[in-house]
Image (cartoon, grey):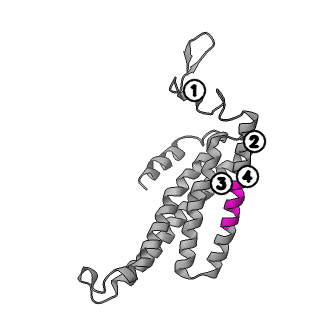
Amino acid sequence: MFMYTLYFTRLISSELPEEPKRPGMFVAVGPAAYTSNTLVALGMQAPRVLPPAFLGITSIPTGDLWKAFGVASGMFVWLLGFWFFALSTVAVLSGFRKMHFTLNYWAFIYPLAALTIAAIQIGNALNSDGIRGVTSGMTVLLVATWLVVAATNIRAVWLGHVLWPGMDEDMEDVEGHGQVIGVDGDKRN
């Protein structure tokens, strides 16, 4: 979660990443979503696992207290993840016409799966049919996104746009560490 400070600083102090690299912005969704999932899951287990007089507290059931804290804080952190999702979505949509497939497109999948799993946990914790319905829709969209990214990846490999010598988006970093070597052998930045 502390890495968000660096991420915010980067977003505020400079421009958005180049259009083909913008799907990588979705990676910021993952830590918040998995933290939310963890907080809610631990909170839901607390009443069953914690003894009645945990930490010497006898005036209230400590398991229920931990449950309330876990679910509430998990919902807050989920909203942070959703904010990163919205920010990343706007960034991708604003540069969509200039984008072409890169392996960064897989960054759509893992973080969105985390956001969906955390939302499912929240829906179960609150026993909310509305949230469960929304998470069913999120799951369908996640599967559709996975199918589109997989098909686009297969197409890009088939056409030789990725995973071919000289065609990977980071190929200049393998030997030159960001330096492009010209035809005459001179290194250029």
Quarter of the rendering containing residue 120: bottom right
Query: Marks 3 and 1, how far apart in space?
Result: 28 Å
The correct choice, above or below, for 150 with respect to 184 in the image is below
The amino acid type of the residue labelled 4 equals Val
The correct choice, above or below, for 112 with respect to 125 in the image is above
Left or right: residue 158 compared with residue 91: right
Q: Residue at x 64, y 71 (%)?
A: 135
| Bounds of the magenta segment | 138-148
- The residue carrying mark 4 is 148
Which of the two residues, 51 or 185, is positioned nearer the viewer here? 51
First of labels 3, 1 by sequence position: 3
Q: Main secondary structure of the magenta part?
A: helix
Q: Residue at x 62, y 44 (%)?
A: 104
Numbered circle sitting on residue 172: 1
SS at badge 1: helix
Which of the two residues, 29 or 139, is positioned nearer the viewer here? 139
